[in-house]
Amino acid sequence: MTHRPTRSALYIPGSRDRALDKARGLPVDVILFDLEDAVAPDEKAAARETLEEALAAGGYGPRYKVVRINGLDTDWGAADVAAVAEMACDAVLLPKVNSAADVEALAAQLPDVPIWAMMETPQGILNAAEIAAHPRLEGFVMGTNDLAKELNSRTRAAMRVSLQTCLLAARACAVIAIDGVYNAFKDEEGLRAECDEGRDFGFDGKSLIHPAQVAIANEVFGPSEAEIDLARRQIAAFEDAVAGGQGVAVVDGKIVENLHVETARATLAKAEAIATLEAS
Ligand SMILES: CC(C)(COP(=O)(O)OP(=O)(O)OC[C@H]1O[C@@H](n2cnc3c(N)ncnc32)[C@H](O)[C@@H]1OP(=O)(O)O)[C@@H](O)C(=O)NCCC(=O)NCCSC(=O)C[C@H](O)C(=O)O
Ligand SMILES: [Mg+2]
């Protein structure tokens, strides 16, 4: 399945007019409009209205517009759901999802909007497969801050099992998988290293907290020129091999079989989708 590009997913506090406006000009693939943790309790109602107005005003172009609501068990969840039903958004992001029943509870209240799940609780990680399999589920976003708190873990390495469990579940169900945030938003080197690791794991993109992080995520999660060139050469070599009655080609000293060609075609499709997005 080919989704729209999701290399960079920037959280924007729903309460911050200036940030909501700035996002209209940022080269980000996904905007995570936040009504949850980035908004103080006293500002929740005002943030909902501010966000409604910003989305109604538009100007976000082809960016994937996802609204993170407060949990359904909070004082603000019901009003958020009612508001999202009227908002011009592409998906709703439910925090602290523990089970497929949590997704179903939201699905029952919001019939037509695709649902994304924050994966950030131990119970949620253990139930990742059933959550990903919910028919309305379209994306996972890792909540590594909440997860670190819940696990009492001090390093990202300690969260590897959780990250990869969610990735397995996402891949089994063709669900988008976005890695967690990198909190030290002025540390470019650290961000790049964490993006590289997330890309190596197989994530589709990185969730971000500051505009300065967008370019690095877009670069790391988009196919490089070298990857595009290799993909083209693999496809051409394999087609030649097939025409010559062979099932295997060799490129740069490595075998190329049908499955590698599928990956190569996916790389080119992704590069094309990114080029289309960036041209619009
Ligand atoms: C981290 C920040 C508080 C820093 O804000 P600030 O000090 O204002 O940064 P700058 O002065 O460098 O800002 C420069 C300009 O960029 C705009 N800006 C800043 N952040 C954003 C943003 N996220 N989106 C759009 N625009 C942004 C500023 O308005 C400045 O613009 P201008 O004035 O026109 O020059 C701040 O970046 C911030 O609040 N970030 C978001 C924090 C957030 O969303 N947190 C919640 C999500 S993380 C999470 O919950 C993950 C998960 O649940 C888990 O458990 O892990
Ligand atoms: Mg969280």
Image (spheres, rainbow, N blue to C red):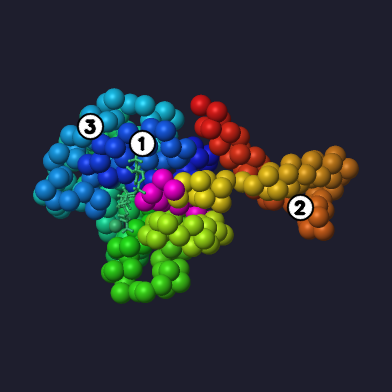
Asked if residue 249 shows in the view, the reply is yes
Q: Which residue is mark 1?
A: 22
| Label 1 to label 3: alpha-carbon separation | 16 Å
Q: Position of residue 99 (x, y in %)?
A: 28, 57
Foreground tag (2 vs 3): 3
Work out whether 27 lies above or below 58: below
Q: Secondary structure at mark 1?
A: helix
Q: Secondary structure at mark 3?
A: helix
Work out whether 153 lies above or below 62: below
Rendered image quadrant of residue 245: top right
The verdict on label 3 being within 8 Å of ligand 1 is no
Residue at the (68%, 48%) spot, across then down: 227
Work out whether 253 lies above or below 3: below
Disc ID at residue 52: 3
Rendered image quadrant of residue 235: top right
Left/right placement of residue 247 relative to residue 34 reads right
Q: Is residue 208 magenta?
A: yes
